[in-house]
Image (cartoon, rainbow, N blue to C red):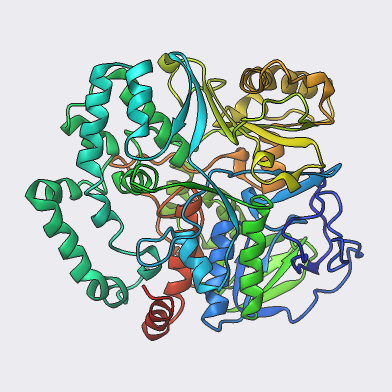
Amino acid sequence: MSSFPNSLHFFQPPSHSRTKSRTSATSSNGSFSLKQNKTTPFPGKAEADVVVIGSGIGGLCCAGLLARYQQDVLVLESHDLPGGAAHSFEIKGFHFDSGPSLFSGFQSKGPQANPLGQVLDALGETIPCANYDSWMVYLPEGEFLSRIGPTEFFKDLEKYASASAVQEWKKLLDAILPMSAAAMALPPLSIRGDLGVLSTAGARYAPSLLKSFAQMGPKGALGATKLLRPFSEIMDSLELKDPFIRNWVDLLAFLLAGVKSNGILSAEMVYMFAEWYKPGCCLEYPLHGSGAVVEALVRGMQKFGGRISLGSHVKEVVVENGRATGVKLRSGQFIRAKKAVVSNASMWDTLNLLPKEVVPKSYKDRIKMTRQCESFMHLHLGFDAECMRKDLGIHHIVVNDWDRGVDADQNVVLISVPSVLSPDLAPPGKHVLHAYLPGTEPFDLWKGLDRRSAAYKDLKAERSEVMWRAVERALGPGFSREKCEVKLVGSPLTHERFLRRNRGTYGPAVEAGKDSIPGHSTPIPQLYCCGDSTFPGIGVPAVAASGAIVANSLVSVAQHTQLLDAIGI
């Protein structure tokens, strides 16, 4: 694994849809390189209208839309590859996703499209995808192929749960699917962080919102008022008590936002149910891996004149006369932001970039008091596909013990084998695999360990064993860990180091109804934030929406309205 370089260079996406290497960012067509001296001056002009810190999905969505709005935007990324938690890397011809691999809504259009799909549409970019409709689950009750859609899951419930579970699942779908019209009536791309939202969202979409309420009837409309409350309240109001249903919904909520059903906004869950359990729905995996999503966003941004500089480690947000006016790089160079600085870093990492004397105590205290999700363990494998069964699916979810809770450490393992849908991610006859513990690995177990020490290596072997066992269960007797050609184990320290994430955290563990997710403005004028530390929260659609909201807030209502007209929403 590569370290963060200190050199400065601009990224041009390679002509194919994969990132060539994690350890050397020189593409096959020679379009960019890391081989520069630490003292190389900043390429291009050292100023922009808006400087974006970090190239995660949220930061790239924000920058892409700003470029589309004809703003001079510059993204500064510390890593040698763009994408943040969604970046891809290559080792020995195996191309790995480092983060998200469960996607949907790329190809949807119009007002009810996925936020990321709306941003890509605005940038004139499309992502070729392989469609599928199922994943394997390995539960204490048994293992089965779980299919999305309105009816298929009932068969699994009949076999592995109970008749009451079937009835309660039907009751849940009947109650919440009508709410999806209200949850999706307001396109995320229409939202902005000022009173202009009354025009771009309120007046523009009021008729469709009122129509959706009318179609739901009094009972449905009353339920829709709970969209900003915890999803568990909807389940409680329906008197859903079957243990399997409660556990299953907790699992879906945790995979979506890092909290269980008592902590996730109902709107997020209703949106997800609408995408996964409506007639004709499907899941989508981007051909060439999650890196193809990142490259499409970078390509779209550059198409409209936006810039991105990799290996550009921001050390400090510069505040002059009480306003954010730019950033200082680790090299000491100052990059001026004429209109705004947008941080795509976590709230804790953004706080550490600010001069202590300019931060109000109330703001600092709120950030420090916000509970964090735990971190990750990762297992990346490259292996021979010859002995694997021919019907091997892309996704596998292993739950060891419902009683411990889906948020317990060493309990839930997610596995992705994307080469079954995109064979070019591995050499011929091979597979790539990414298994991980989703935001449940305690950082304190790892805190202070020397990554070169025997104690660190021993702990990696101990804490990764649950992933190895899950992989062996999912892949069957044809798999041998000893025969893997690539074996990489990532710890919370890996997560902290490569992603510059405070304590390697998944994000804020904000529970709906108990606290609110921070907005996008800060007490420092001209400093904004986007990403999973801001509304709507954790997850690819959520961070895409957050980036869009910030971009919209930095331009006029007229420009914003013109964009909505142009993409037909």
Above or below residue 140? Residue 86 is: below
Above or below residue 236? Residue 268 is: below
Above or below residue 247? Residue 7 is: below
Task: Indicate left or right for 472 with 333 as reference.
Answer: left
Residue 246 appearing in the image:
no
- Residue 410 in percent (x, y) is at 57, 20
Looking at the rendering, which quadrant does residue 419 occupy? top right
Seen at 67% across and 27% down, the residue is 446
Seen at 43% across and 21% down, the residue is 405
Above or below residue 470? Residue 527 is: below
- Give the residue at the far left of this rendering: 218
Closer to the camera in the image, 360 or 310: 310
Closer to the camera in the image, 530 or 242: 242
Task: Indicate left or right for 60 with 434 as reference.
Answer: left
- Residue 404 in percent (x, y) is at 44, 16
- Give the residue at the far front of this rendering: 390
Residue 124 appearing in the image:
yes
- Residue 119 in percent (x, y) is at 50, 67
- Residue 318 in percent (x, y) is at 62, 69
